[in-house]
Image (tube, helix red, strand yellow):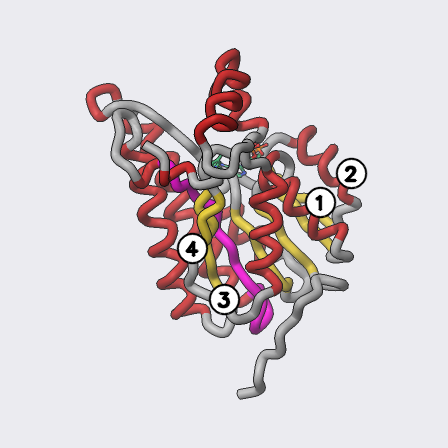
Amino acid sequence: MNDIEPTPSLQGQTVVVLGGSSGIGLETARLARSAAAEVIVTGRDSERLRQAGVELGAVRTAQLDLADAAGISEFFEGLSAPVDHVLVTGGGPTYGTIADLDFDDARRVLDEHLLGSLRVARHAAHSVRAGGSLTLITGSHARRPGPGLSIAAIAAAAVPVIAANAAVELSPVRVNAIAAGFVDTPLSARLLGAELETRRAELRQTLPIHRVVNAADVAATALHLMTNTAVTGATYDVDGGQQLIP
Ligand SMILES: NC(=O)c1ccc[n+]([C@@H]2O[C@H](COP(=O)([O-])OP(=O)(O)OC[C@H]3O[C@@H](n4cnc5c(N)ncnc54)[C@H](OP(=O)(O)O)[C@@H]3O)[C@@H](O)[C@H]2O)c1
């Protein structure tokens, strides 16, 4: 087997971002473009996806739901050539105590995050070139049990396991995960509504980094995991130390 050389640059490489029309995914696609990569982005909402595609100068956009197994197959089978890197972001979250859990919603979120990641991993085995990468995004804050966190916690516990097992099975394609804490994205704004500014202020005061983590922070780690060919099966925390505070 030939040695896989380190590839510190993304220049001329193709990066697929599933969930690339907003937040962490969009910022990762922007950073990849600024590193001279070509990008392919997906999302569910056609107008948001169109705008992202235009802004990024994407080589392709595709409407895709991570819960849609057939759609995922169709997307990967439609790639004209092996790609270099795939990032999976999007899907969920859902919060609710066990007493109030909406099981249909819980099933949907677990299907998107867990089976969705496995479905993408199955395709990445054939669609990503040797030494390329698959990166999965999950959360860190639900590692500590709390009311309403059980589904988020299951996803946060399982995604690193998926990454590690897929890293073994997909070798020499590398598979890693990023566990994010609070990230200042449109999703966080939607979830918190009028509470957003209070939450930002609280995080500035309490996080060891004394600032709020943003999508560019996570994107920088995503690009590192794409280009550092020594890393596989790992989960990198990007949470400003959120899990360290009481
Ligand atoms: N923001 C945080 O604080 C935080 C912390 C930890 C983990 N995360 C996780 O990180 C991921 C990205 O979060 P974000 O804050 O960047 O969210 P965002 O700003 O809402 O962006 C999510 C992206 O994924 C797409 N998407 C969402 N659900 C999808 C689905 N089921 N199938 C396909 N595409 C989907 C969205 O487009 P469409 O809606 O048009 O499909 C959009 O492009 C999520 O899985 C979230 O749970 C976020």
Q: Which residue is mark 2?
A: 55
Q: Secondary structure at mark 4?
A: strand
Q: Which residue is mark 3?
A: 231
Residue neighbourhood size for the residue with mark 3, other residues' Cα within 10 Å, grouped as few (<14), some (14–19), many (≥20): some
Q: Earlier in the sequence, mark 1 or mark 2?
A: 1
CA–CA distance between discs 4 and 2?
30 Å
Amino acid type, label 3: Val
Callout 1 touching callout 3 (CB < 8 Å): no
Residue neighbourhood size for the residue with mark 2, other residues' Cα within 10 Å, grouped as few (<14), some (14–19), many (≥20): few
Q: Which residue is mark 1?
A: 30
Amino acid type, label 2: Glu
Q: Secondary structure at mark 2?
A: helix
Residue found farthest to the left: 99
- What is the chief secondary structure element of the magenta stretch? strand
Q: Which residue is mark 4?
A: 235
Q: Secondary structure at mark 1?
A: helix
Amino acid type, label 4: Thr
Disc 3 CB within 8 Å of nearest ligand 1 atom: no
